[in-house]
Amino acid sequence: MLKYPALLISVVFQPLLIPSLVFGLILYAVPEATSIPAEFKDRIFFLIVLSTLLIPMITIIGLRLSGTLKSLHMNEIQDRLIPFSITSVYYLLTAYFLYQKTELDPILWQTLSLITIAVIGLTVVTFFWKMSAHMTGAGGLLAVVLVLGYKFHTFQVLYPLILSILLVGAIGSARLFLGAHKPIEIYVGMFFGFLVCFLGFNWIWA
């Protein structure tokens, strides 16, 4: 009976969603975190959603339909290598595109570069071990909320922090319940994502 809620959590809060959530926080919840004019924020956000969520998701679905990918759940390490590698390339290209746009706030390419570092690290580890991608993303999101909370005093961090902690717990529990990961894979993924983003965003907003 609990399988369906666990599956729903895993599907809705998939790792590809995390960059959109991070940029949503930076662009809209903490306006002073970036110098992007309000009239351009929607376009930037759409670009991020398109390049880090929609295009990778469509590519992965295409891999499944072509038979290259056995399952969208990617339960086996071999199933993860191609999708993770392709996603890393998409993220690298988008980060480079933002870097080239020198008229834009550097926070954009710096943020996506940090996320890309986490994705590439996850991909490299996946060649040897099955670290949780879900928890890497969730740990990174929690780190971003914490850093925003003490770097920008206008950010009302309490409720986003509570929601982030609950989300980390829900995603981790769902992945364990579905048998997708062992506990160590959950914990390592979470701490890896948290560490990369906590250190990285502290450096960005130093």
Image: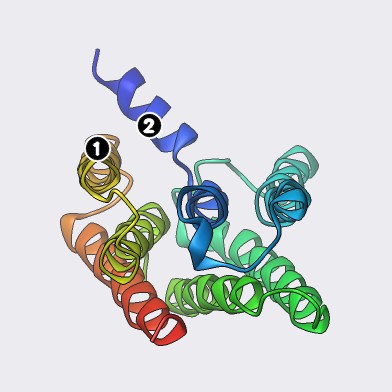
Q: Which residue is mark 1?
A: 170
Task: Report the residue that reaches farthest toward the top.
Answer: 1
Side of 147 where 11 appears, left or right? right
Helix, strand or loop at label 1? It is helix
Quick one: 194 or 28, which is closer to the camera? 28
Q: Residue at x 32, y 75 (%)?
A: 198
Q: Which label is found at residue 61?
A: none
Mark drawn on residue 9: 2
Q: Position of residue 23 (x, y in %)?
A: 55, 56
Way the structure is coloured: rainbow
Q: Amino acid at mark 1?
A: Ala
Quarter of the picture holding the C terminus: bottom left
State if disc 2 and disc 1 touch (CB < 8 Å).
yes
Find residue 66 and report its horizontal and vertical position in percent: 80, 43
User: Quadrant of the rendered structure where residue 189 is?
Assistant: bottom left
- The local crowd at label 1, few if under 14, some if 14 to 19, many if 20 or more residues have their Cα within 10 Å, is some
Between the residue at mark 1 and the residue at mark 2, the CA separation in whole angstroms equals 7 Å
The residue lying toward the viewer, choosing from 60 and 64, is 60
46 relative to 23, above or below: above
Q: Specify which label sits upstream in the sequence, 1 or 2.
A: 2
Residue placed most toward the observer, 202 or 150: 150
Q: Residues within 10 Å of mark 2 (few under 14, many from 20)?
A: some
